[in-house]
C-alpha cells in the first residue's frame, strides 16, 4: 500500500466496526443446539432486533460435530441489517460449546479470539469413536483444551453444564441458555430470557430450573455441581464381615516389608487378591512382592524411588486376580452389585428389577475350572471334548435374580476352594512366574527395562478370544524385548512395543515395531 | 408421514395478508408456492429441502382447502415428469429436491419438459447442497439449467427476496414458456428470517379442470420435426421473452453508487457475505450502504447482456463473485464484453478460489486483492479486518490440533442397522474381507469407524447395480447394501431386477427400517405406519420375489446378530446360483422413540404394567479392552475412567441415553466377547404376581448374599 492513499479523506460508510452480535453454537447432532438457537433468536426478536440463524443439518445431525450460527442487530430507520450466514474467524462475540472437545474444535476453527470472544463451554466429555475403540486408553487430553482456552478466549465460562442440567431434570441447552444470560454479553434482562423459555410449553419448568441454576453458577452464587455420581451408589452397608486377625497381620507385613512409596498401591493390590481368593492368597502376594522388592533393592531401586516395587505391587495383583468363571460368578452375585445397579437406575420402591446376563461359556472355561490333572487328561480326548463343547458352547441368557440361575451362579462363585488346583490357576501361575523371572533378570542389568516388562502385564485382558489375543500380544512383546534386551535403549523399545500393542486390536502397529526391531537386532 | 408432526409449521402456511411469517427459509418457500397459486406440488425429500416435503405432507387440510394436489414422488425423475401437467394446461406446478444429485436423476424428464416448453408456470426448487456440511459431490446445478435452457433463479438469502422471486418466477415461466429453477443453498434453506405474507391463492385452473377437458398438441412432443422446432423456439422466442421479463421487472438488482471505477457482479446468493466482506474493508455498513456499485444477479441464467454491458460500460474493472466451478458466469460476461468491445477488465476466479464456500472471510481476501489490483485508493481507510491467525499459530493452539478427535457422523443410539454391520464384521473375521458396495442412506456410515465396511457408493439405490461387474465365478461373492429408500427409489429395477436378469451370483442386503430415515423419516411404500392418504405396508420381500428373486431371506429383527451373521454366511457360501437377497427389517430407532416414548410414559403414568429395558456394564468384570465398542460404535456405549489405582485403561460404560435395543448383549454373545454386559429390566407398576415372585426370590438371594458377605475377610481393615 502506498502511503498517500492512507491520507485520502475517504469517509467510511457508517461505523464499519458496528457489526451484529454474532453467536456460534458448536455441538453434536442431537444435543438440542437447535432449541438453544431458536431461544436466542426469539430473545432477540422479542426486543425488536432482526435475528438470523443458520445451521447445517444433514449427516452432521447424526451424532457428528455440527455448528449453529446466529447474528442479531436492531434495525436502523426501518432498514434491516444484512446478516452473514457463516461465522467469520476472528469475528465471533460468543461461542457456546456443548462439549469440551467441541470447544477445542471451535478454537481450531478460529472462532475464539482474545479481542472479542466470550467462550461458554461445558467441560463434560462425550468421547469420539476414535477415543473409544483404542484397546488401551485413547481418551483425549482435556488439559490441551484448557490451555488453548486460556490463550484464545477473551472471557471464559467453563463448567459441567450437562451435570447441572441433569441435576435439575433438564437438558444442556437450558443450562447453556442460563450461562449465556449469566455472562451478560447480551444487553437483555434475565427475565426476558425466562419469558422465552416459559413461552415453550414442553418441560418449561425443568428448563427454568436448569436455567436459573446455571445463571447463579455463572454469577458464582452456587458451587460447582459434581457429575452425576455412580460409584457412590455402589457403597452399600454389606453384612458385617469377620475381622480376620490374619488380615491385620498382612497389613502389618506390608507396611513393614515394603517401602513407604509402595504402601498405598500395595494395599490396593493386597485387597484385590484377598478379595479374589482368600487371606492366604494375600500372603502369597506379599511373599512374591517381597522377593521382587529384594531384587529391586539389589538393583539400586532406592535411588529410583522403588519404581520396580511399585509397578510390581500393581501388576502382580492384576496377574494374580485373573478373570475366571468363578470370579465373574462371584461378582455377579454380590449384594453390592445389585445395589449399584439399583442406584444407577434410581429404582423406586414400586418397581421390580430383574437383570439378564449374556453368558457364552466355552469348554475352555469349564476346563479351566477343573482340577489340572483331570483337565489335562480330558484335553487328550478331542472327540469327547468336542462332544462336550457342543453341549456347553452356546449363548445363555441368564436371569440373575431368578432362583435357579442365582443359586447356580452362587455355587460357581463359591468354588474358590477348587481354584488353586484348577488348570487355569496352573496356567496363570506358570505364565506369571515366567514374566516375573524376565522382569527380575532385566532389572539387575537395566532397571527401567525391568519396570517396563512388569508394565507389559497391561496387555493381558479380556475374555475368551479377546483374552487369547491379549495374551499373544503380551508374549510377542516379551519375545521382542528379549531381542533388544542387551541394548542401552531397550527400555524405550519395550515402552514403544507396549504402546503400539495398545493402539489397535489387530496388532498391526505392534508387528510394525517388531519388524523394525528385527531389522537391527 | 414420519412419526414427527409438523403441525406447528403447517399453521404458518395459513398466514395471510398483514401477517408476518417467521421461520426457516425452506418453509418460507413452501408458503410462497401457495401464495403463487400452484395447482400441484411434488418432489423427493433430502437435505436441505426435506422440510418442504414434510410440511406439505402434513398440510392436507390447507392443501385441500386450496385444491392443491400434493404428492411425495417415488424419485426425482417422477417428480420432474409430474411437471408435464403444465405442458398443455395453464396449471402452475412446483417440484423440489436435493441438488445436484436429484437433478441428475431428473435430468431426462427435465430435458424433455424444457424442449417442448410449458404453458403453466413450472418451478423446480433445488436445494443446492454445496460447501461445508454437504453430503454429496461438489457440483453446480447451473450446468443443467444451461444445457436444457431452464431459467435459473439465485435469490439473495432474504425471505422477502426469495418469496418475491418465486411469485415472479412463475410469471417468467409463463411468458417464456420455459421451466424455472430456484436455487437455494443449504444455509439459506435453514436460515431463520421473516417476510410479510399475502393470502394463499386458489389455482385459477385446477387439475380437475384439466382432467375433464383434455388437450393435446403433437407440436409439444419431443419427436422430429417438432424437436428441431423446439430448439429454434428456445433461441428465437423463449429466450428473448425471458430477457425482456427479467429486465422489465428488475429481477436483478443494482446497489450502491451509480458511478464507480470498479464494481462487483455477484450471484444473488453471495450478496450477504459480499456485504460483510465490504464492511470489513470499510466500504459498507451493516445495512448494505455500499460505496462500491453492485450488480446482484438474482437471475443467473439467462445472463441479461444489456444489463451487464450497462454496468461495466464506465468501469475499469469488475469482480465476478460466483461460487463453485466451472466459472460459467465469468465466461458468459467475458463474451458479452468482448462482443461489445467494452474494456472493463474482468476479475473473478483469479482473485477468488475456484472451488469451495465463498465465506465472508474468503470474499474479504478476494475483494481486497481485487481492489489492490484495480483501485487501491478505496482501501485507504481500511479498519483492522478480523483475523484469527495470531491465535491459530500459537503453540498452545497448535498442540490442540493433535488432541481434538475427529467426530464423524455415525448410527444413532439403538439404530437397527448397527447389528447388521456388527454381523458383517463377524462374518468378515470368519470368511475374510469381501467387496462391499455401499449405497446412500444412514447405512453409508458403515464406511466410517468402527465398522469400516463399504468400498464405493454410486448414488441412491445404485448399491446393488454397482456390484454388477463382479458377476464372475470366484472364491468370494460381492456384497451390496441398499436401504429401503434406495430400493423404492430405483433399486428394485436397477439393482435387484438387474441382478436377477443377469443371474448375478452375489449377495444383496436390503436394510429396511420402515422410513427413508436419512432424509428425516418420511414414509415409503414399505412403511409400516398406516396412512390414510397413502398406500403403505407393501412388502419388499414380495416385490423382490415378484421381480424374480428366488433366494430371499427376511430377517424381521435385525438385533438378532447371531441369525444375521448365519444368514449372511449362508448367502456367501450357498451352492445356489443367482442373487441372494437378504431383507433385514427393524424400525428406525429415532422414529420409533418419537413414537413410543410418549406412549410409554403415559402407560406408566396410567399405572399400566410396563417393562423398561436398559443395558449396563459391570465395571469390575469389564477389563477395558473395548472390543465391544469396536463392534458397535453406539453413542450410548462409551468408556469411563475408574478411580482404581490398579487400572490403567478406562472400562466400557453405558449412559442413560441407552434405549435397550439389545445390540450390546447380542454382540457380546455372538462374538463371545465377555460377560460384562447385562440387561436391566425395570417393571413399572408391577402386578401382585411380579411383586410376589421377586419378593420370594430376593429373600433367598438376600440371605445367600449376606451369608457370603459374612464370610468375606473384612477388607476395611486394610484401608
Image: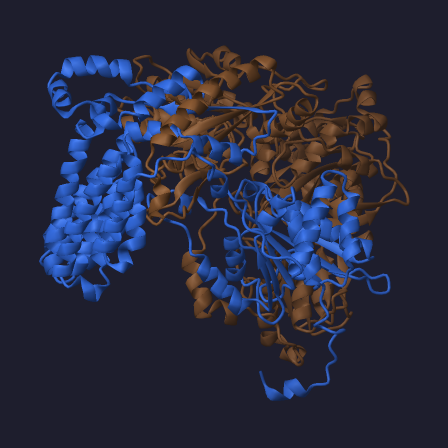
B373 left or right, relative to A477: right
Percent position of residue A278, x then y: 26, 35
Q: Residue at x 37, y 19 (%)?
A: A407
Report whether residue B449 is seen. no
Percent position of residue A371, x then y: 17, 23
Percent position of residue A214, x then y: 66, 54
Rendering colour (chain B): brown
The quadrant of the image that shows the C terminus of chain A is bottom left
Q: Residue furthest right?
A: B18
- Compared with B292, B538 (above or below) is above
Which is nearer the eye, A171 or B450? A171
The picture quadrant where one finds residue B507 is: top left
A117 left or right, relative to B285: left
Q: How many marks?
A: 0
Q: Residue at x 53, y 61 (%)?
A: A107
Report whether residue B372 is seen. yes
Rendering colour (chain A): blue
B155 left or right, relative to A396: right
Which is nearer the eye, B547 or B279? B279
- Compared with B243, B30 (above or below) is above
The quadrant of the image that shows the N terminus of chain A is bottom right
Percent position of residue A438, x then y: 12, 49
Amino acid at each position: 500500500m502506498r502511503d498517500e492513499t492512507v491520507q485520502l479523506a475517504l469517509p467510511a460508510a457508517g461505523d464499519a466496526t458496528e457489526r451484529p452480535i454474532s453467536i456460534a453454537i458448536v455441538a453434536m447432532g442431537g444435543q438440542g443446539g437447535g432449541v438453544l438457537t431458536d431461544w436466542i433468536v426469539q430473545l432477540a426478536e422479542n426486543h425488536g432486533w432482526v435475528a438470523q440463524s443458520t445451521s447445517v443439518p444433514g449427516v452432521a445431525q447424526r451424532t457428528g460435530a455440527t455448528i449453529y450460527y446466529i447474528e442479531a442487530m436492531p434495525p436502523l430507520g426501518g432498514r434491516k441489517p444484512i446478516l452473514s450466514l457463516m461465522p467469520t474467524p476472528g469475528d465471533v462475540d460468543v461461542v457456546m460449546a456443548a462439549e469440551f472437545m467441541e470447544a477445542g474444535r471451535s478454537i481450531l476453527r478460529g472462532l475464539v479470539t482474545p479481542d472479542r470472544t466470550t467462550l461458554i463451554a461445558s467441560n463434560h466429555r462425550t468421547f469420539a469413536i476414535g477415543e473409544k475403540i483404542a484397546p488401551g486408553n485413547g481418551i483425549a487430553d482435556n488439559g490441551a483444551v484448557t490451555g488453548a482456552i486460556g490463550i484464545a478466549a477473551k472471557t471464559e465460562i467453563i463448567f459441567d453444564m450437562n451435570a447441572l442440567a441433569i441435576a435439575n431434570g433438564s437438558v444442556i441447552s437450558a443450562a447453556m441458555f442460563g450461562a449465556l444470560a449469566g455472562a451478560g454479553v447480551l444487553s437483555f434482562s434475565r427475565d426476558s430470557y425466562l419469558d422465552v423459555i416459559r413461552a415453550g410449553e414442553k418441560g418449561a419448568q425443568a428448563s427454568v430450573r436448569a436455567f436459573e441454576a446455571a445463571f447463579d453458577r455463572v454469577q458464582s452464587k452456587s458451587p460447582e455441581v459434581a457429575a452425576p455420581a455412580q460409584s457412590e451408589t455402589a457403597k452399600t452397608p454389606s453384612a458385617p464381615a469377620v475381622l480376620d486377625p490374619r488380615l491385620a497381620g498382612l497389613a502389618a507385613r506390608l507396611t513393614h516389608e515394603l517401602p513407604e512409596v509402595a504402601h498405598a498401591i500395595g494395599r490396593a493390590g493386597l485387597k484385590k487378591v484377598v478379595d479374589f481368593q482368600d487371606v492366604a492368597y494375600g500372603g502369597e502376594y506379599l511373599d512374591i512382592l517381597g522377593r521382587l522388592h529384594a531384587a529391586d533393592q539389589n538393583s539400586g531401586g532406592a535411588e529410583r524411588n522403588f519404581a520396580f516395587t511399585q509397578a510390581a505391587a500393581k501388576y502382580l495383583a492384576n496377574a494374580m486376580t485373573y478373570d475366571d468363571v468363578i470370579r465373574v460368578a462371584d461378582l455377579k452375585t454380590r449384594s453390592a452389585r445389585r445395589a449399584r445397579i439399583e442406584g444407577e437406575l434410581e429404582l423406586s420402591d414400586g418397581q421390580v428389577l430383574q437383570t439378564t446376563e449374556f453368558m457364552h461359556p466355552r469348554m475352555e472355561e469349564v476346563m479351566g475350572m477343573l482340577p489340572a490333572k483331570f483337565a489335562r487328561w480330558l484335553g487328550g480326548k478331542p472327540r469327547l471334548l468336542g462332544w462336550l463343547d457342543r453341549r456347553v458352547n452356546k449363548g445363555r441368557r441368564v436371569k440373575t435374580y431368578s432362583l435357579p440361575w442365582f443359586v447356580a451362579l452362587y455355587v460357581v462363585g463359591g468354588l474358590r476352594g477348587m481354584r488353586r488346583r484348577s488348570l487355569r490357576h496352573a496356567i496363570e501361575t506358570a505364565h506369571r512366574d515366567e514374566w516375573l523371572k524376565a522382569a527380575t533378570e532385566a532389572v539387575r542389568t537395566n532397571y527401567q527395562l525391568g519396570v517396563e516388562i512388569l508394565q507389559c502385564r497391561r496387555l493381558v485382558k479380556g475374555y475368551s478370544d479377546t483374552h487369547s489375543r491379549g495374551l499373544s500380544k503380551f508374549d510377542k512383546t516379551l519375545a521382542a524385548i528379549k531381542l533388544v534386551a542387551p541394548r542401552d535403549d531397550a527400555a524405550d523399545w519395550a515402552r514403544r512395543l507396549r504402546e503400539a500393542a495398545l493402539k489397535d486390536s489387530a496388532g498391526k502397529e505392534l508387528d510394525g515395531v517388531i519388524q523394525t526391531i528385527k531389522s537391527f537386532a | 408421514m414420519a412419526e414427527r408432526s409438523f403441525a406447528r409449521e403447517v399453521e404458518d402456511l395459513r398466514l395471510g395478508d398483514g401477517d408476518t411469517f417467521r421461520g426457516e427459509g425452506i418453509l418460507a418457500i413452501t408458503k410462497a408456492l401457495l401464495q403463487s397459486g400452484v395447482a400441484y406440488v411434488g418432489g423427493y425429500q433430502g437435505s436441505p429441502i426435506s422440510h418442504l416435503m414434510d410440511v406439505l405432507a402434513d398440510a392436507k387440510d390447507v392443501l385441500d382447502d386450496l385444491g392443491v394436489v400434493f404428492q411425495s414422488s417415488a424419485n426425482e425423475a417422477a417428480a420432474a415428469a409430474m411437471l408435464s401437467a403444465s405442458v398443455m394446461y395453464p396449471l402452475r406446478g412446483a417440484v423440489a429436491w436435493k441438488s445436484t444429485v436429484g437433478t441428475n436423476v431428473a435430468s431426462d424428464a427435465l430435458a424433455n419438459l424444457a424442449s417442448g416448453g410449458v404453458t403453466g408456470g413450472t418451478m423446480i426448487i433445488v436445494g443446492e447442497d454445496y460447501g461445508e456440511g454437504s453430503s454429496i459431490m461438489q457440483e453446480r446445478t447451473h450446468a443443467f439449467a444451461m444445457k436444457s435452457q431452464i431459467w435459473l433463479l439465485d435469490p439473495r438469502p432474504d425471505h422477502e427476496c426469495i418469496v418475491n422471486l418465486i411469485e415472479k418466477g412463475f410469471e417468467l415461466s409463463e411468458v417464456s414458456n420455459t421451466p424455472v429453477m430456484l436455487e437455494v443453498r443449504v444455509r439459506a434453506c435453514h436460515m431463520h428470517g421473516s417476510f410479510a405474507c399475502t393470502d394463499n391463492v386458489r389455482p385459477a385452473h385446477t387439475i380437475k379442470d384439466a382432467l375433464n377437458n383434455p388437450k393435446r398438441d403433437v407440436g409439444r412432443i419431443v419427436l422430429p420435426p417438432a424437436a428441431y422446432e423446439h430448439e429454434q423456439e428456445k433461441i428465437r422466442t423463449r429466450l428473448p421473452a425471458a430477457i425482456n421479463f427479467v429486465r422489465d421487472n428488475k429481477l436483478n438488482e443494482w446497489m450502491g453508487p451509480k458511478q464507480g471505477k470498479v464494481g462487483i457482479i455477484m450471484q444473488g446468493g453471495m450478496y450477504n457475505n459480499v456485504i460483510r466482506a465490504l464492511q470489513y474493508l470499510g466500504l459498507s455498513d451493516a445495512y448494505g450502504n455500499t460505496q462500491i456499485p453492485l450488480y446482484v444477479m438474482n437471475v443467473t441464467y439467462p445472463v441479461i447482456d444489456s444489463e451487464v454491458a450497462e454496468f461495466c460500460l464506465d468501469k475499469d474493472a469488475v469482480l465476478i463473485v460466483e461460487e463453485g466451478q466451472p466459472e460459467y458466469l465469468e465466461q458468459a460476461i467475458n463474451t458479452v464484453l468482448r462482443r461489445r468491445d467494452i474494456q472493463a477488465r474482468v476479475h473473478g476466479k483469479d482473485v477468488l478460489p475456484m472451488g469451495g464456500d465463498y465465506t465472508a472471510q474468503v470474499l474479504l481476501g478476494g475483494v481486497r486483492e481485487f481492489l489492490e489490483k484495480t483501485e487501491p485508493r478505496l482501501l485507504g481507510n481500511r479498519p483492522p479486518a478480523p483475523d484469527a491467525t495470531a491465535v491459530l499459530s500459537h503453540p498452545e493452539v497448535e498442540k490442540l490440533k493433535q488432541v481434538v478427535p475427529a467426530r464423524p457422523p455415525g448410527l444413532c443410539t439403538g439404530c437397527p442397522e448397527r447389528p447388521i454391520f456388527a454381523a458383517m464384521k463377524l462374518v468378515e473375521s470368519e470368511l475374510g474381507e469381501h467387496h462391499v458396495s455401499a449405497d446412500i442412506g444412514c447405512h453409508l456410515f458403515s464406511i466410517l469407524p468402527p465398522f469400516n465396511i463399504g468400498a464405493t457408493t454410486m448414488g441412491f439405490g445404485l448399491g446393488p447395480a454397482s456390484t454388477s461387474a463382479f458377476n464372475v465365478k470366484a472364491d468370494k461373492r460381492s456384497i451390496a447394501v441398499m436401504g429401503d429408500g434406495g430400493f423404492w427409489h430405483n433399486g428394485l429395477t436397477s439393482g435387484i431386477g438387474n441382478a436377477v436378469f443377469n443371474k448375478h451370483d452375489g449377495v444383496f442386503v436390503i436394510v429396511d427400517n420402515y422410513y427413508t430415515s436419512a432424509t428425516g423419516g418420511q414414509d415409503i411404500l414399505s412403511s409400516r405406519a398406516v396412512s390414510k392418504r397413502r398406500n403403505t405396508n407393501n412388502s419388499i420381500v414380495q416385490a423382490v420375489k415378484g421381480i424374480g428373486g428366488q433366494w430371499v431371506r427376511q430377517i424381521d429383527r435385525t438385533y438378532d446378530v447371531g441369525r444375521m451373521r448365519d444368514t449372511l454366511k449362508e448367502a456367501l457360501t450357498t451352492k445356489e446360483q443367482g442373487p441372494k437377497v437378504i431383507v433385514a427389517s427393524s424400525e428406525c430407532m429415532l422414529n420409533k422413540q418419537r413414537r413410543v416414548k410418549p406412549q410409554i410414559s403415559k402407560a406408566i403414568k396410567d399405572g399400566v404394567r410396563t417393562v423398561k429395558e436398559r443395558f449396563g456394564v459391570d465395571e469390575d468384570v469389564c477389563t477395558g479392552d473395548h472390543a465391544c465398542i469396536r463392534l458397535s460404535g453406539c453413542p450410548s456405549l462409551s468408556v469411563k475412567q475408574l478411580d482404581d489405582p490398579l487400572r490403567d485403561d478406562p472400562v466400557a460404560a453405558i449412559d442413560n441415553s441407552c434405549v435397550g435395543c439389545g445390540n450390546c448383549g447380542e454382540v457380546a454373545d455372538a462374538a463371545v466377547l465377555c460377560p460384562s454386559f447385562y440387561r436391566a429390566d425395570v417393571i413399572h407398576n408391577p402386578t401382585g404376581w411380579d411383586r410376589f415372585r421377586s419378593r420370594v426370590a430376593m429373600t433367598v438371594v438376600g440371605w445367600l448374599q449376606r451369608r457370603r458377605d459374612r464370610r468375606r475377610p473384612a477388607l476395611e481393615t486394610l484401608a
